[in-house]
Amino acid sequence: MQSHAEKILDKLKTLIAAATSAKIERNSVISERIPPTGLVIIRDGNPDAEYVLGGFSNVYYSHNIEIEIYIQEGETAQRDRKYDELMQVIGEVLEAHPTLDGLVAGLTYGRPEPTTQPLDGGPPIKFGVILLLAEYETATPLT
């Protein structure tokens, strides 16, 4: 049986994977070569719990999840375009599924701050992190 947080992370991965040809992973290390279609890594993040006084009720979470976007293929303009397109696809997924099909009360996110990292002997990598806040409740802290 999966915890509620794990269901949320799996649903997020499934929805993004269905919308793009980029490689989608969870908590992985960045490979030496980014696939031509891009790489998205979803990090488990940090669930911040709030308890009702006395601890006799549900647990309410504000779960910070990181969605990392990586593009390496192409010249600067092409890399910028691919990065923007991948970011837009993820935004469309989040807008189309604001409750992740009922798993969360709501999602809040912002635009990532893009960075380009030069590499010795290879094309630079453009990357950014979408900070996603998922609000939800569970019956206990571990469910």
Image: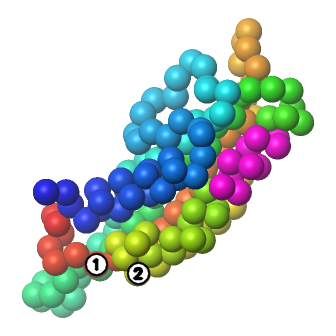
Q: Quadrant of residue 74?
A: top right
Residue in the picture at 29% in, 56% down: 6
Magenta region: 80-89
Q: Secondary structure at mark 1?
A: strand
Residue 11, position in %: x, y?
39, 58
Residue in the picture at 61% in, 26% down: 34
Image position of 77 (left or right of 1): right
Q: Which residue is mark 2?
A: 105
Residue 101, position in %: x, y?
40, 72
Residue ranking furthest to the bottom? 53
Q: Are marks 1 and 2 in contact (CB under 8 Å)?
A: yes
Residue in the picture at 41% in, 42% down: 26
Residue ranking furthest to the top? 121
Cα separation between marks 1 and 2? 8 Å
Q: Is residue 113 placed above or below 83 in the rendered structure? A: below
Image position of 59 (left or right of 30): left
